[in-house]
């Protein structure tokens, strides 16, 4: 469903497992670049059960790197995350900051990050890495905080907020992130990592209030729930390195969050069936019990 808009373009969709070496080798054969987005990506699910995250995010990355090396492809862009750095109370992470992940998800992505670096150092595979802040926008799976809040409110439900909502995140619209990945692919220095941030920070309570106000919902729509174990307090990136490549965010938060709310309001067909799925409902029931 997500790819339907691309069907008229020159896109070949291959259904396969990123850990399946034969399937990956067949997909990579003859390609001149690899963009590695494939990942289990939700912190909460990694806390409930980390195995799938270790398998996909570590082994899957190794399979892709090895296939790219064997095929002699061009640039390999590994899409990592700011969560590999852990939490920072003040200041900003640079690309040379220590990697200190605090959740199974972040640890699995950090492992993939280091594998990508190792393939550059050992084999000279032309690897580049991006470490981005929190994404939001169309087509984001409704386990993530922005689509979870927006779709719950559309359904007339409350929105679950961890602890007191004091955890701070830096936010970026998905199209700006994609433009950043493209900039790194085209202009980045091989073997280097690039932070991708907007310098726009909100704590989770502020985020909830912004969404409630835009959707005309009362503050009583917030349901405070037990905090996430090991919840990182704050992520914040120094993105000066990627800005030297000519990239900067084009969407401010207010415009982007309005576009996002409008998209979920106009595309119920895409997300309602996802939230009705047995696996999703079981996860929500367990996570926010």
Image (spheres, rainbow, N blue to C red):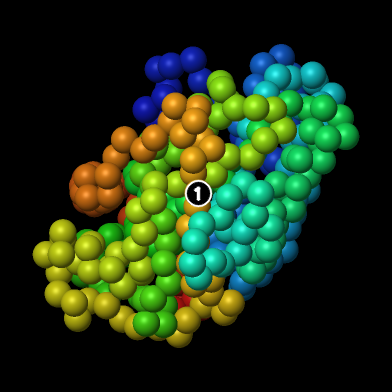
Mark 1: few/some/many CA within 10 Å (<14, 14-19, 20+): some
Is 108 situated above or below 33? below
User: Can residue 148 be spotted in the picture?
Assistant: no
Query: Could you tell me which residue is drawn at 36 percent across and 68 percent down?
Result: 203
Eyeballing the image, is 119 above or below 70? below
Is 282 on the left-hand or right-hand side of 164? Answer: right
Query: In the displayed structure, does residue 182 sit left or right of residue 107?
Result: left
Q: Nearer the viewer, residue 189 or 4?
A: 189
Classify residue 153 by image quadrant. bottom left
Q: Residue at x 72, y 63 (%)?
A: 51
In the foreground, 86 or 115? 86
Residue 43 location in percent, x, y? 56, 64
Q: Position of residue 18 (x, y in %)?
A: 70, 40
Displayed quadrant of residue 128: top right
Instruction: For the N terminus, give its image quadrant.
Output: top left
Give me the residue at 56% from left, 67% from top: 87
């Amino acid at each position: 469903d997500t790819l339907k808009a691309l069907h008229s373009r020159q896109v070949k969709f291959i259904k396969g497992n990123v850990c399946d070496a034969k399937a990956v080798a067949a997909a990579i054969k003859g390609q001149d670049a690899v963009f590695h987005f494939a990942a289990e990506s939700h912190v909460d699910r990694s806390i409930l059960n980390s195995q799938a995250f270790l398998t996909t995010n570590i082994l899957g990355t190794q399979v892709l790197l090895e296939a790219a090396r064997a095929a002699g492809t061009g640039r390999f862009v590994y899409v990592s995350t700011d969560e590999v750095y852990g939490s920072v109370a003040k200041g900003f992470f640079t690309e040379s900051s220590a990697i200190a992940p605090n959740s199974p998800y972040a640890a699995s992505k950090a492992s993939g990050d280091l594998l990508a670096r190792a393939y550059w150092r050992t084999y000279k595979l032309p690897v580049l890495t991006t470490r981005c802040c929190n994404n939001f926008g169309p087509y984001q799976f409704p386990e993530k905080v922005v689509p979870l809040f927006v779709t719950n409110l559309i359904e007339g439900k409350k929105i679950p907020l961890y602890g007191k909502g004091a955890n701070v995140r830096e936010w970026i619209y998905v199209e700006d992130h994609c433009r950043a990945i493209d900039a790194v692919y085209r202009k980045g220095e091989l073997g280097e990592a690039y932070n991708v941030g907007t310098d726009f920070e909100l704590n989770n309570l502020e985020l909830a209030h912004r969404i409630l106000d835009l959707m005309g919902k009362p503050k009583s729509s917030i349901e405070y729930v037990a905090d996430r174990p090991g919840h990182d307090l704050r992520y914040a990136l120094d993105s000066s390195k990627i800005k030297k490549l000519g990239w900067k965010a084009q969407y401010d938060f207010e415009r982007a969050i309005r576009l996002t709310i409008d998209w979920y309001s106009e595309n119920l067909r895409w997300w309602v069936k996802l939230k009705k799925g047995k696996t999703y409902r079981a996860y929500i029931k367990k996570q926010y019990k």
